[in-house]
């Protein structure tokens, strides 16, 4: 606890008392008999407590919304007790069922088209393979012929160099070689053309299959969405409770009217709600000065005076991230007087109760919230009234040492509304002066 902020008056009184004591000592007033109250510094159990107000709330009011645009065929009456899984409403699905049948027929057509495309692609692949094989065979034959002619030319050139054959034979062989080279080149180009054409055909067929597959996937998606909508048309209770039809302002009749069977609704329109009585929490707040002392998981003691002084326990479930005026917080509204605002900032918190099954608990019920911020055994403490402060914010006490009174600086720890922990400056048994001196 921040003693600097909590006891400015203590510091002033302590400083004033100390100054008066020193002046009196200098003027000889010490000869008069002085009486003062003292108390020992002693080990105690120090319990630091924060008390707040709160209100019981349901964690949620379960809203029942229309999953899609349609007409209400059936709707449970307001005030009906329902269990989780009970049917609350039915929406007309005739159009959805017709659309589902149409999409199924469309999918059958796409399947037939896909089978035909696969068969055509298979046939084309076989034809292309035969063409490529034939072209490859032709190319191989011309290459063999080219090799033979080239060998023949080499032999004739050798024989002609020894005047064993006529020069005309050599020229004839050279001509056949060029012809064979041209044939080989032509067959090679033919093979390349066949391969390129086959690849182009395969790519076109692959593109066709992909397009058909995309159409099939889109149709399957639409079938799934339509089937899901048909399933969602039967709207079931997500929790136990009392179903209440949604009311809205009707300008024609100038009154609030409930949802009715036969009414057209849009996607997301509210049909009703179920207050969830199985998940009650207490909403409260903590001062901003205690934001570092209360954390998620901090234990809380609860009491509900209106419910026969029902007692309970809980833990801090969540803490708000923004400070708000106390009068606007959940528990602060209970104690607000409507007069001048306090100006205090608080953080709203949600407390999870260990047991919220008691039938006396109701949403909106007031609660008293008690935080035990710290409980320390055997810590050295003195009464709160023994603490004095300097203008610089340091703390000190007056200690009786025999017939003398001395001032000691102290370091403080936790405190409550009665006692404060002394970390340094005192020992167990030291007698400290309580409050202002009394003269006799």
Image (spheres, grey):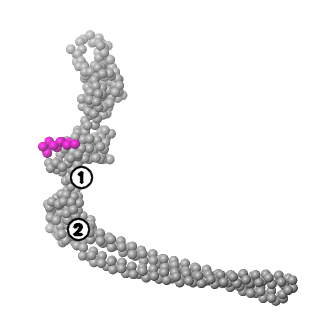
Picture coordinates of residue 5, whole percent (x, y) = 31, 33
Horizontal side of 30 relative to 162 (left or right) equals: left
Q: Residue 234's mark? A: 2
| Residue 371 seen in the current view | yes
Q: From the image, which quarter does the C terminus lie in? A: top left
Within the magenta stretch, is there residue 304?
A: yes
Please report contact status of discs 2 and 1: CB closer than 8 Å, yes or no. Answer: no
Residue 131: image x %, image y %? Answer: 57, 84
Q: Earlier in the sequence, mark 2 or mark 1?
A: 1
Residue at x-position 22% and y-position 40%? 301
Find the residue positioned furthest to the left. 308
Based on the picture, tell me whether residue 359 belongs to the magenta stretch: no
Q: Which numbered marker is on residue 59?
A: 1
Residue at 21 percent across and 62 percent down: it is 85
User: Where does the image place residue 383, in percent across and percent down from the top left?
Assistant: 26, 26
Disc number for residue 271: none
Quarter holding residue 298: top left
Query: In percent of the image, x 21 and y 45: which residue is there?
Result: 54
Taking depth in this image into account, of 18 and 395 the one nearest to the observer is 395
Pointer 2 local density, CA inside 10 Å: few below 14, some 14–19, many at least 20: some
Tag in front: 2 or 1: 2
């Amino acid at each position: 606890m921040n003693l600097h902020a909590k006891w400015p008056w203590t510091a002033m009184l302590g400083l004033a008392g100390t100054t008066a004591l020193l002046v009196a000592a200098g003027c000889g007033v010490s000869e008069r008999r002085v009486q003062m109250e003292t108390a020992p510094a002693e080990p105690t159990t120090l319990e630091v407590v924060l008390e707040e107000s709160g209100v019981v709330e349901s964690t949620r009011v379960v809203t029942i919304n229309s999953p899609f645009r349609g007409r209400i065929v059936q709707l449970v009456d307001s005030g009906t007790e329902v269990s989780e899984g009970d049917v609350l409403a039915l929406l007309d699905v005739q159009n959805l069922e017709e659309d589902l049948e149409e999409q199924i027929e469309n999918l059958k057509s796409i399947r037939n088209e896909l089978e035909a495309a696969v068969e055509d692609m298979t046939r084309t692949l076989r034809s292309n393979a035969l063409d490529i094989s034939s072209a490859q065979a032709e190319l191989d034959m011309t290459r063999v012929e080219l090799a033979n002619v080239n060998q023949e030319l080499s032999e004739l050139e050798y024989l002609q160099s020894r005047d064993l054959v006529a020069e005309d034979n050599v020229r004839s062989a050279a001509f056949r070689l060029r012809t064979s080279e041209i044939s080989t080149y032509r067959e090679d180009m033919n093979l390349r053309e066949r391969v390129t054409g086959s690849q182009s055909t395969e790519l076109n067929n692959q593109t066709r299959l992909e397009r058909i597959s995309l159409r099939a996937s889109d149709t399957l998606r639409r079938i799934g969405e339509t089937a899901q909508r048909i399933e969602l048309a039967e709207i079931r209770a997500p929790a136990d409770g009392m179903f209440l039809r949604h009311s809205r302002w009707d300008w024609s009749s100038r009154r609030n009217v409930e949802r009715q069977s036969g009414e057209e609704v849009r996607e997301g329109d509210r049909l009703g709600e179920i207050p969830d009585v199985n998940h009650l929490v207490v909403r409260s707040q903590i001062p901003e000065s205690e934001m570092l002392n209360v954390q998620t998981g901090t234990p809380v003691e609860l009491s509900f005076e209106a419910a026969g002084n029902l007692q309970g326990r809980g833990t801090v479930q969540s803490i708000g991230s923004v400070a708000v005026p106390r009068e606007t917080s959940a528990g602060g509204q209970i104690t607000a007087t409507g007069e001048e605002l306090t100006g205090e900032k608080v953080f709203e918190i949600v407390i999870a109760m260990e047991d919220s099954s008691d039938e006396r608990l109701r949403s909106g019920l007031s609660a008293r919230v008690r935080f035990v911020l710290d409980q320390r055994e055997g810590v050295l403490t003195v009464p709160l009234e023994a603490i004095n402060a300097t203008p610089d914010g340091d703390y000190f006490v007056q200690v009786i040492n025999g017939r003398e009174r001395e001032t000691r600086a102290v370091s403080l720890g936790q405190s409550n509304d009665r006692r404060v922990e002394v970390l340094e400056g005192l020992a167990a048994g030291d007698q400290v002066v309580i409050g202002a001196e009394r003269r006799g």
